[in-house]
Amino acid sequence: MEKKPWLLPLLFFLLILTFSFTGCGDNSQAGNTDNFANVKKTPGSDLNEFELENGIGPVKEKLSLSPINKIFAKDGEKIFESKCAACHKLDERYVGPAQRNVLQRVTPEFFINMVLNPDENLKKHPHAKKMLAEYMQMMTNQNVNMNDALALLEYFRILDEELQKSSNK
């Protein structure tokens, strides 16, 4: 198997991101913003309200999500296995937080911004800094592109949908 030194840091970051939001028990979409309820704009901070809720990165406005694309989600699963699984597991804390319910803890926009821009988020975003303090490991920039990040999002949307269906039984 080919060694990928960048995979471990990415997985760690995703794990950190996931665990930082696991404390929220509400599975509703409204629960996403609860994770940032205690995040205040500090004097001198250059983060705006959108960035506080959705992270720092290329996504600058709310995404308009279509129905889940299962083929794209399969690509996301492969990306997760190749770039994220060294640091993140779906259902347990590892180097970083568990990822199955990541979209119940963060917004889709935060997820994408964190995947695409972990370095700046870890330096400037209060939630990312908190996760770094908890996991003591920086998420590595895996150099994924927007298409890969969207495929990962679709994969986690499917996992979230499955999780919600199983909890409604």
Image (spheres, grey):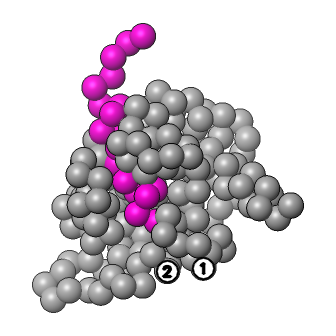
Q: Residues within 10 Å of mark 2 (few under 14, many from 20)?
A: some
The reply, left or right, for residue 84 in relation to residue 117 is right
Q: Amino acid at mark 2?
A: Asp
Residue tagged by mark 2? 34
Q: Quadrant of the N terminus?
A: top left
Q: Is residue 140 magenta?
A: no
Q: Amino acid at mark 1?
A: Ala
Q: Nearer the viewer, residue 60 or 77?
A: 77
For the residues bearing labels 1 and 2, Cβ distance under 8 angstroms: yes
Residue at left offset 56%, top offset 29%: 78
Residue 71 in picture, x, y percent from top left: 71, 36
Residue 51 in picture, x, y percent from top left: 35, 73
Residue at left offset 38%, top offset 47%: 96
Give the Cα separation between the discs numbered 1 and 2: 7 Å
- Give the residue furthest to the left: 44
Residue tagged by mark 1? 30
Element on which disc 2 rests: helix
